[in-house]
Amino acid sequence: MLGEYRIEGRRAADISASIEAAVGAGHLEPGRLLPPMRELATELGVNPNTVAAAYRILRERGVIETDGRRGSRVRPKPATTGREFLRVEVPQGVRDAAAGNPDTALLPPLAPAFAWAAAQGDREPVLYGHAPVEPELARAARAELDADGVPGGPVAVASGSLDAIERVLAAHVRPGDTVAVEDPGWGSLLDLVPALGLRTAAVGVDDDGPLPEQVRRALEAGARALIVTDRAQNPTGAAVSAARARALRDVLREYPSTLLVEDDHGHGIVDLPLHPLAGVTRHWAFVRSVAKAYGPDLRFAVLTGDDVTLDRVRGRQRLGPGWVSRITQRAVVRLWADGVVDAAEVAGAYGRRRDALIAALRRAGPPGDRGRSATWRTPSRPRSAWETYAATSDGARSPGRLFRSPRPGSVGGGRAAHERAR
C-alpha cells in the first residue's frame, strides 16, 4: 500500500499502531503522504470513520499531521522516529552549531561539587517520602528569582527546560488546543508541541522579543497558551526589553486565562537584564535552565509559577520520576555558592565568537544580522535552498562554510536544521 509496507488492522487502535510501528522502524519516512481515509478504509474493509479515528490518534501522538485537502503525512520529526533518520551530516572540519553545545572550556569542573554533595548524601540519605526539592536550593533559587522581579511562587526542579515546559503544558492544555510559539523558534519546542497533540500559532520575533500585535491576534484566535523566551531567543538572539515587556503584559491583561510559560534558558550566560512577564495571567510558569551554564548532562532546570500550576506539575512528577536527584540538587547549590560561573565573562566569550561568525558570514556573502544576546541571528529571509551556515572548527575565526539542507518536510530539513537544540 505504501511501497513495500502494508498498513494493517480492523480497529482504529490497530491501524494507528501499524502506522506508528512503521514510522518508528523507518519504513514510513518523515514527510511520507498517507493514503486518503476513504481509500485506506476500502483497502482494509472498514468504515471510513474508523480510519479517521486512527489518524486522529496519530495526530494526538505527534506522529502525523493533516493539512486539509492536501491530506495527512508523517511529520518531519515524528515523536516515534529514531533521530538517525533526521541527521544533517556536517562536513569534515566544520563545527556543528545546530547541536547547541556549550564550549566545554567555559563549563565549571563538577567533581568537587559532586564529591561534596555525595558526602552530604552519605550523612543524610534521601529516602522515599522526603521533600523533592533541596531546601537550600529552593531558598537560593527563590532569592535570585525575587531579585529579577519574578513573582512569588513555589519552586520545583525538572530534568531540563523542555521537561519543565512539557509538564506545565500537560497541566493545563489538552490535545487540539493551540499554543502560541515564537517564529522562528526553538526546534525542540516546535517538535514537542505537536507531539503533545497541540496546534501551534506562529508569533513573529524581533530583537526585543515577540511582537505584541501578533501575540494579540494569536490569543484572539483562541490560543490557550503562550511560550516566550526572555533572553537568548533561539535562533534570533532576541531578548525581551523593558518596553516590550510592558507591551506584552498589556496584551496578556486582556486575556487573563492564558497560560504563560517563560523560558530563561540563558540565565548564567547572558549579561542582559531580565524583564519577566509573569503576574498578569491566572496561570503562569517561569523556567530557568542550569544546563547551559553548568553542563548539559546535569539535565536540570528550576521552575516556579502560580500555586495551581506548580501543584499539578509536582503531583504528576510524583507519579513518574518522583524527583530530580537530591545529590544533583546539592551539587548545583554548591556550584552556585562557590560562584564558579561568571555570567559576564561567559557571555562576553560567546558574544565575541558570535561577532566573529557574523563577520565571516558577511565576508562569505550570506546576509546576517545580530541579535542582542547569546547567539547569532539568522537571515530574515532564508534563501530558497534553505541554506544552513556553520562556523569552521577554529571558532569562526576564518570564513564560515556554507552547506545546504533539504527543503522543509524532507529528512533533516526545515528551519530546525539550523537551530541549536537546548
Image: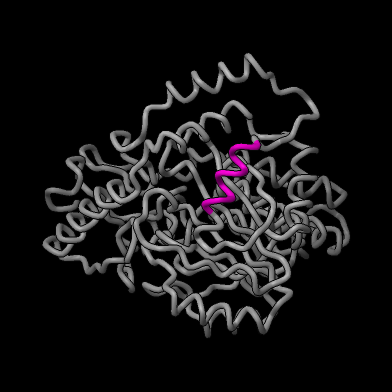
The structure residue drawn at horizontal position 40% and vertical position 66%, both measured from the top left corner, is 239
Residue 191 in the image: above or below residue 336: below
The structure residue drawn at horizontal position 39% and vertical position 66%, both measured from the top left corner, is 238
Q: Is residue 110 left or right of residue 55?
A: left
| Magenta segment | 135-144
Q: Is residue 336 left or right of residue 227?
A: left
Q: Which quadrant of the figure has residue 49?
A: bottom right
Residue 352 visible to the viewer: yes
Q: Residue 354: where, in percent of width, then height?
A: 24, 55
Q: Residue 137: where, in percent of width, then height?
A: 59, 39
The structure residue drawn at horizontal position 82% and vertical position 45%, both measured from the top left corner, is 14
Residue 4 visible to the viewer: no
The structure residue drawn at horizontal position 18% and vertical position 49%, both measured from the top left corner, is 396
Q: Is residue 34 left or right of residue 378?
A: right
Q: Is residue 272 magenta?
A: no
User: In the depicted view, which residue is nearer to us: 115 or 135?
Assistant: 135
Q: Residue 350: where, in percent of width, then height?
A: 27, 50
Residue 24 in the image: above or below residue 78: above
Query: How is the rendered protein coloured?
Result: one colour
Q: Is residue 374 left or right of residue 17?
A: left
Residue 159 in the image: above or below residue 238: above
Q: Residue 409: where, in percent of width, then height?
A: 49, 59
Q: Mainly helix, strand or loop, the magenta region?
A: helix
User: In the depicted view, which residue is nearer to us: 402 or 158?
Assistant: 158
